[in-house]
Amino acid sequence: MDKNSTFELNNGTRIPVIGFGTNVLQGESGIKDIQRALEAEYRLIDTAQSYENEEEVGLAVENSPVPRQDIFITTKITDENQGRELTFESTHASLEKLRTDYVDLLLVHWPNLDDFDISLETWQALISLQEQGIARAIGVSNYTPDLIQLTIDESSVIPAVNQVEFHPFLFQKDLMDYCQSQNILVESYCPIARAEHTQAPILQHLSEKYDKSPVQVILRWHLEHGLVPIPRSTNPDHIEANLDIFDFSITEEEVAKMDELDMNYRIVNPEKGPPSWRKA
Ligand SMILES: NC(=O)c1ccc[n+]([C@@H]2O[C@H](COP(=O)([O-])OP(=O)(O)OC[C@H]3O[C@@H](n4cnc5c(N)ncnc54)[C@H](OP(=O)(O)O)[C@@H]3O)[C@@H](O)[C@H]2O)c1
């Protein structure tokens, strides 16, 4: 595996094994960060309608020497745009901002727990957008196995991806096992838990053993589990370092030791986290 490697999604589309997160990267500096990521050879750029930076992504991609077809762009339908018509309209608005006529991956950003029917409707709209070639692959984000199963039962279409918060301190084994058993790729957001907790003894030990930083060890852990991490950085050295994880691997035993770092530590919307997610 190297930085140009890809995984095959359940509809045959290929996704890079690591991506670049862009939440909060905005304006001129945001464009520069995304350009820097493309120069470093990230080929997956993760944005969302709610990040209000699809224009920045579009400009960075347009100004890059890398051909559009070699870049995998993900965007997400934000809560206010759920429902059939708004999903269509907002996706077209996203395409305009992204300066492209298709996205590689289109996700439902959050399940609507007060009215899950609207999320099912949004999913049906995504299915149509995929049929029209506007999205090469479609998926969900922040979905529990129950919600995914409901989505599959109602539509007979299995999401290609579930993008969730995932890192050694929130090792969601049941969710991972369920997704992998359904051939749903798990994309890890906050993959390095914002570089907190890097002092953990096992991370320090592996860092020394492999001459890699604790963050690089964590990113490698995602790859060993078959997960696609999408770290974000504005620091040129970190942008480079986060891709420099293909010249070592950690053993199964070491992966299992890192799994034990789990402490159900949730950074994003902890108040929304399961079990309340299961109420829908
Ligand atoms: N679907 C969803 O609901 C959802 C929710 C949250 C996030 N996401 C996506 O996931 C992406 C990543 O998550 P995130 O941005 O929240 O968190 P993250 O990638 O876990 O952490 C980013 C932070 O870590 C620091 N960092 C990065 N590389 C480092 C390194 N090598 N050494 C030390 N520090 C480093 C960055 O600071 P520097 O800039 O100084 O490097 C930044 O403060 C987002 O950008 C977004 O695209 C999706």
Image (tube, rainbow, N blue to C red):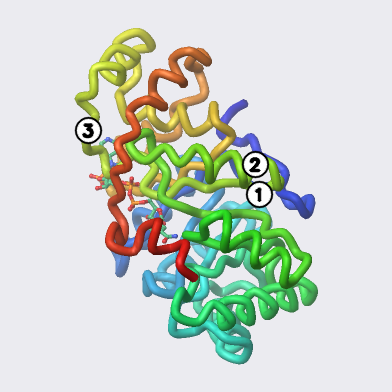
Q: Which residue is mark 3?
A: 197
The Cα–Cα distance between marks 2 and 1, rounded to whole angstroms, is 5 Å
Q: Which residue is mark 2?
A: 180
Between 17 and 110, which is closer to the camera in this rendering? 110
- Image spot of residue 82 (x, y percent): 53, 82
Label number found at residue 184: 1
Amino acid type, callout 2: Gln
User: In the rendered view, does 10 fall on the left or right side of 196?
Assistant: right
**Proximity of marks 2 and 1: CB atoms separated by less than 8 Å:** yes
The Cα–Cα distance between marks 2 and 3, rounded to whole angstroms, is 27 Å
Q: Residue at x 55, y 31 (%)?
A: 225
Between 251 and 245, which is closer to the camera in this rendering? 251
Q: Who comes first in sequence, dot 2 or dot 3?
A: 2
Q: Residue at x 74, y 71 (%)?
A: 155
Question: Number of labelled discs?
Answer: 3
Q: In the structure shown, which secondary structural element does the residue marked by tag 2 occupy?
A: helix
Q: Residue furthest bottom?
A: 85
Between 198 and 152, which is closer to the camera in this rendering? 152
- Image spot of residue 254 (x, y percent): 44, 15
- Image spot of residue 185 (x, y percent): 62, 46
Amino acid type, callout 3: His
